[in-house]
Image: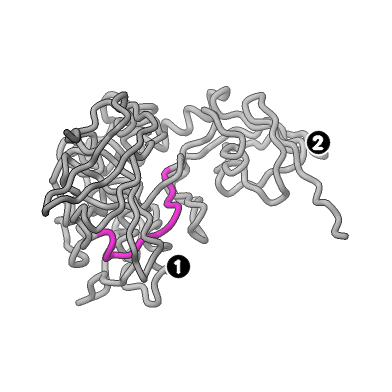
């Protein structure tokens, strides 16, 4: 009989949670839930080697452990700092931590363009949400921002390097899901940028997932570019028969039209199951999908402004026509055609 592993007790903003040894502060906060979960722009639990780059998850460790109660002298990146038994952490209750997160947000915006009104990511952008929470009303920088021309790095992927924060999520995903990565971070320091190798294009069957893991609008879907603002579309859970992936995705609809397809994400914006390029880019006909019902977007952003109820949703195809039937009429703002 194996011995039971002793769990560590950690206190975050006065709330105690027990976690397994080796757990990071960020993951411990996510297990606890609530508003004390630090923001994260580069960390991605499903990508090996992620974290430690953006520093938006800074926290104050006011007590190292029961064995060594001394506080840590500097703010710590919660995605890289493992818990100790008896550790006490402050996030919302620490003025130092909040000031640190504000400073990091200001740093991320040094080169970021003010193009939210034309960016496809607006309404579901992690940096946009972070800016509303911690951003300054005016900039303190006087030098010119770095500028790049938009680039097609694949048949269906557009790269706007102006918006990139070099979180490296797309590079790590390509390392993990593809057999041969064809893009990466070139140059160093101020000149660092995401780009492909010479004469190469990103056309792997699962490379479209870099769009979903990008926390900003640096990587966008060319098949749905400028089609609609995200808050005018309705996310619907859908599934299809696919021999490459699970076929479980979210279709973003405007009326009876599918504008884009994305993978399903959890409350922290991380993909639950990666989907293939065929499902993402090629299947825009509602007849190819089994529409299961409205997708609940549980995040503090414009995208969750509409309140979705539990709806009994069915898909019908009659004489070449298709529409969605919503039986539960308390679902607000959902465009549909009612059966007669």
From the image, state whether disc 1 or disc 2 is nearer to you: 1
Disc 2 crowd rating (10 Å Cα; few below 14, some 14-19, many 20+) is few
Q: Position of residue 187 (x, y in %)?
A: 32, 64
Earlier along the polypeptide chain: callout 1 or callout 2? Answer: 2
Please give left or right for residue 254 compared with residue 50 in the image: left
Residue marked by disc 2:
66
Q: Position of residue 283 (x, y in %)?
A: 22, 60
Q: Residue at x 64, y 30 (%)?
A: 12
Q: Residue at x 38, y 55 (%)?
A: 248
- Give the structural element (helix, strand or loop) at label 1: helix
Q: Residue at x 69, y 34 (%)?
A: 17
Q: Is residue 321 above or below residue 153?
A: above
- Dominant secondary-structure state across the stretch colored magenta: loop
Magenta-drawn segment: 269-280
Disc 1 crowd rating (10 Å Cα; few below 14, some 14-19, many 20+) is some
Please give left or right for residue 260 compared with residue 272 in the image: left
Q: Position of residue 154 (x, y in %)?
A: 21, 67
Residue 30, image quadrant: top right
Residue 295, image quadrant: top left
Q: Position of residue 339 (x, y in %)?
A: 19, 35
Give the CA separation, mark 1 to mark 2: 38 Å
Instruction: Check whether the beta carbons of the residues at disc 1 and disc 2 lie within 8 A of each other.
Output: no
Q: Is residue 50 above or below residue 64?
A: below
Please give left or right for residue 323 compared with residue 36 in the image: left
Residue 323, image quadrant: top left
Please give left or right for residue 229 compared with residue 77 in the image: left
Residue 194 magenta: no
Residue marked by disc 1:
176
Q: Residue at x 35, y 46 (%)?
A: 292
Quadrant into which the C terminus falls:
top left
- Give the structural element (helix, strand or loop) at label 2: loop
């Amino acid at each position: 009989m194996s011995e039971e592993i002793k769990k560590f007790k950690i206190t975050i903003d006065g709330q105690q949670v027990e976690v397994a040894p080796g757990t990071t502060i960020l993951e411990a906060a996510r297990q606890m839930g609530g508003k004390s979960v630090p923001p994260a722009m580069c960390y991605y639990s499903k990508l090996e080697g992620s974290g430690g780059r953006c520093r938006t998850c800074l926290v104050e460790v006011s007590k190292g452990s029961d064995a060594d109660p001394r506080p840590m002298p500097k703010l710590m990146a919660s995605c890289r700092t493992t818990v100790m038994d008896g550790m006490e952490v402050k996030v919302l209750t620490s003025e130092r931590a909040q000031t640190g997160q504000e400073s990091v947000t200001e740093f991320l915006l040094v080169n970021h363009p003010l193009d939210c009104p034309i960016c496809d990511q607006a309404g579901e952008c992690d940096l946009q949400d972070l800016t509303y929470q911690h951003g300054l009303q005016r900039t303190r920088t006087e030098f010119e921002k770095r500028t790049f021309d938009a680039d097609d790095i694949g048949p269906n992927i557009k790269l706007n390097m102006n918006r990139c924060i070099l979180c490296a999520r797309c590079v790590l995903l390509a390392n993990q899901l593809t057999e041969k990565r064809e893009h990466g971070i070139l140059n160093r320091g101020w000149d660092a940028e995401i780009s492909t190798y010479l004469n190469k294009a990103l056309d792997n069957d699962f490379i479209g997932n870099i769009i979903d893991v990008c926390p900003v609008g640096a990587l966008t879907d060319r098949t749905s570019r400028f089609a609609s603002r995200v808050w005018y579309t309705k996310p619907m859970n859908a599934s299809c028969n696919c021999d490459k992936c699970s076929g479980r995705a979210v279709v973003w609809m405007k009326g009876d039209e599918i504008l884009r397809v994305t993978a399903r994400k959890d409350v922290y914006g991380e993909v639950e199951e990666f989907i293939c390029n065929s499902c993402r880019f090629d299947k825009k006909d509602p007849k190819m999908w089994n529409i299961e019902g409205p997708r609940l977007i549980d995040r503090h952003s414009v995208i969750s402004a509409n309140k979705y109820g539990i709806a009994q949703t069915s898909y019908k195809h009659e004489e070449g026509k298709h529409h969605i039937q919503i039986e539960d009429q308390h679902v607000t703002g959902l465009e549909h055609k009612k059966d007669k």
